[in-house]
Amino acid sequence: MKILDEHLPAKDFVAFANHNLDMDLVCTGFSEARMKFYKNRVALWQKLRPAFDRAKLNSKSIKENGVLVESNEITSLILGEALEYFGRAFCNFYAHDELIQHGYFTWSEITNYYSSFFGVHSLLRLQGRCITRLWRPKGKQVYVFPYDFQQHKYVICLKGVEGKSAHEAAWSLYYEVYDGFTYSENTDFEYIFKKKHVGTYEEEMDFRNKINYEPYQGYDEIRNPHRIPAIVKFYVEKRFTTNEIELLSRLTTDPDFRFYARSALRLIFCYSMLMDIAKKNDELQSLLYSRKKSLSDFLKRVKPLEGDHTLCHRLQTILGLEVPSVAGTGSS
């Protein structure tokens, strides 16, 4: 890992900070990424920190400037983390499903938020960038983004993250980066990343904060437990039988299903991008095959909501997990 410039002026990198990479460049840039870091559970910060320490750089060194680094390892580490956060988003999506079936509506919505939050982190990495902390556990978060993605050159700076919470930084950068992105394979995904389709970038974060932390917001299930059966029925009988992506895109503004639809779409979008990259990266293709088997085994053990019409089942088909379903609408 080589540090090319310890004090890169902001004027030299500001134009790259929120500039999206088109899908061809994403696939080309990740084409030679190695998946050993994912397999060995090595995070990006663990490789960046020693280089910064050797150069005697700290958060004060990049308060106004950035640090320009070059290494194909960074590209590999970022792709590994994209897959890691995809897995976390997947797990939280199905945890949300389990919680709502048992009447824990508020906590299911909070869990669904985390599915989207981890999906956002995966999608940021699939644009060759991430938010991380080099000086852990209490150090400032930094923003890592491509300066020249094909040459594996990256800027590490505080722009876009300084003074923001970890959640606010992720959501704001996600919408800034993806607002100009085009995924020509299916434009229905735009409902989860174009600014014009949301009220504000904070709305999902604000909803989670309101129901979890504000007095008398959320937790209606313990005030009115008699409503639980009707709400469960409303949820499990929602039908997802054909054109799931198109239906989910329409539901992203629905009062009852909007955040649920967004988390599901982000999962599918992450998967679609990973599969596109895998067409040019044999190591990722092999790893995805292995990971899909693990996710399939996970679902067999946690037994998500059953029934061919449910999104939990349809999502398994979309992601190629091929978990057999059993007729019915409840989990066994």
Image (cartoon, rainbow, N blue to C red):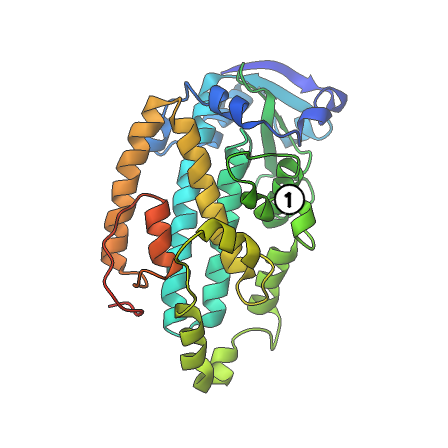
How many other residues sit within 10 Å of disc 1, few (<14), some (14-19) or many (≥20)?
A: some
> Quarter of the image containing the C terminus?
bottom left
In the rendered image, residue 19, in percent from the top left (x then y), is placed at 66, 29
Q: Eyeballing the image, is 43 above or below 193?
A: above
In the rendered image, residue 190, in percent from the top left (x then y), is placed at 59, 44
Judge from the rendering whether residue 8 lies leftward or rightward of residue 189; answer left or right: right
> Relative to the observer, which residue lies in front, 85 or 306?
306
> Relative to the observer, which residue lies in front, 259 or 202?
259
Residue type highlighted by circle 1: Lys
How many dots with numbers? 1
Q: Eyeballing the image, is 88 above or below 5?
A: below
> Does residue 212 show up?
yes
The outermost residue toward the front is 242
User: In percent of the image, x 43 and y 49: which residue is there?
Assistant: 89
> Relative to the observer, which residue lies in front, 145 or 242?
242
Residue receiving disc 1: 194
Q: Quadrant of residue 9?
A: top right
Judge from the rendering whether residue 81 lies leftward or rightward of residue 215; answer left or right: left
> Does residue 53 show up?
no
For label 1, the SS is loop
In the rendered image, residue 8, in percent from the top left (x then y), is placed at 69, 19
The outermost residue toward the right is 11
User: In percent of the image, x 40 and y 75: which residue is there?
Assistant: 233
User: In percent of the image, x 28 and y 54: which residue is there?
Assistant: 299
In the rendered image, residue 129, in percent from the top left (x then y), is placed at 55, 31
Q: Quadrant of residue 313?
A: bottom left
